Image: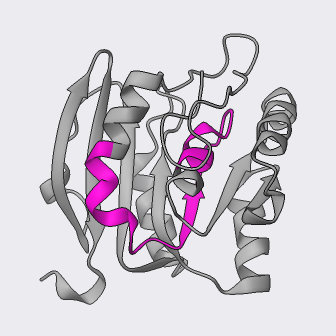
Amino acid sequence: MRVVGGNYRSRPLKAVPGMNTRPTTDKVKESMFNVLSPYLSSCHLCLDFYAGSGALAIEAVSRGVDQAVLCEQNHIALKTIEENLLMTQELSKFHLLKGNNRQALNRWFNDTSKVFDLVFLDPPYKKGRYLEDLRWLKKESMLADQAVILCESDQEHQWDSEVDDFEWVKSKKYGQSYLSLLIYRGDEVE
């Protein structure tokens, strides 16, 4: 695994040992960021809600996003993220939240009131909590207007009719993964 583009390009990243996490391959990550490229210039704060190795948040900051918040509760994954963040030599750009992602993010949000322009939702495939997570982030007012959400899943979703205030832009299959791009429209969508 490596950083695919931007300031940290080609720097190696460690994968989380064991079978409990499923790292996004470099090829899929490159495809993700090709899809995101038209939106990145307006993204300042990124949320990686299921951080795993931290690769997606690191890639986002490498490509110009100002800061990233990473949520993770697995202690082995946390150690891997910490090692990967050290590689960036820019620790001030990253906020690692440990423990239950919702509880940790609520504490952080209550302290900062910062909203996210870019969100990665890549939960464990068997949990498939995309809709629940989107609704929760919306309810907690953690999304900026026009926030970009990229979901990675093992099956295709029909987003267009499922989530109020989110506009489905596109979905594409890459190997075993489906990537779906949504934009948070807030009160715009009727």
Question: Depth check: 45 or 164 in front?
Answer: 45
Q: Is residue 1 above or below residue 139?
A: above
User: Residue at 20% of width from left, 51% of height from top?
Assistant: 159
Question: Depth check: 188 or 148 in front?
Answer: 148
Residue 142 among magenta residues: no
The chosen color scheme is one colour
- Percent of width and height locating residue 62: 57, 51
Q: Is residue 174 above or below residue 188?
A: above
Quarter of the image for residue 82 reads top right
User: Residue at 62% of width from left, 47% of height from top?
Assistant: 58
Residue 35 among magenta residues: yes
Which residues make up the magenta segment? 34-59
Q: Is residue 169 above or below residue 3?
A: below
User: Residue at 46% of width from left, 44% of height from top?
Assistant: 129
Question: Depth check: 164 or 56 in front?
Answer: 56
In the rendered structure, the answer to whether residue 169 lies left or right of residue 98 reads left
- Percent of width and height locating residue 26: 46, 24
User: Residue at 59% of width from left, 27% of height from top?
Assistant: 2
In the rendered structure, the answer to whether residue 177 lies left or right of residue 109 reads left
- Percent of width and height locating residue 70: 69, 53
Q: How many marks?
A: 0
Residue 111 in view, yes or no: yes
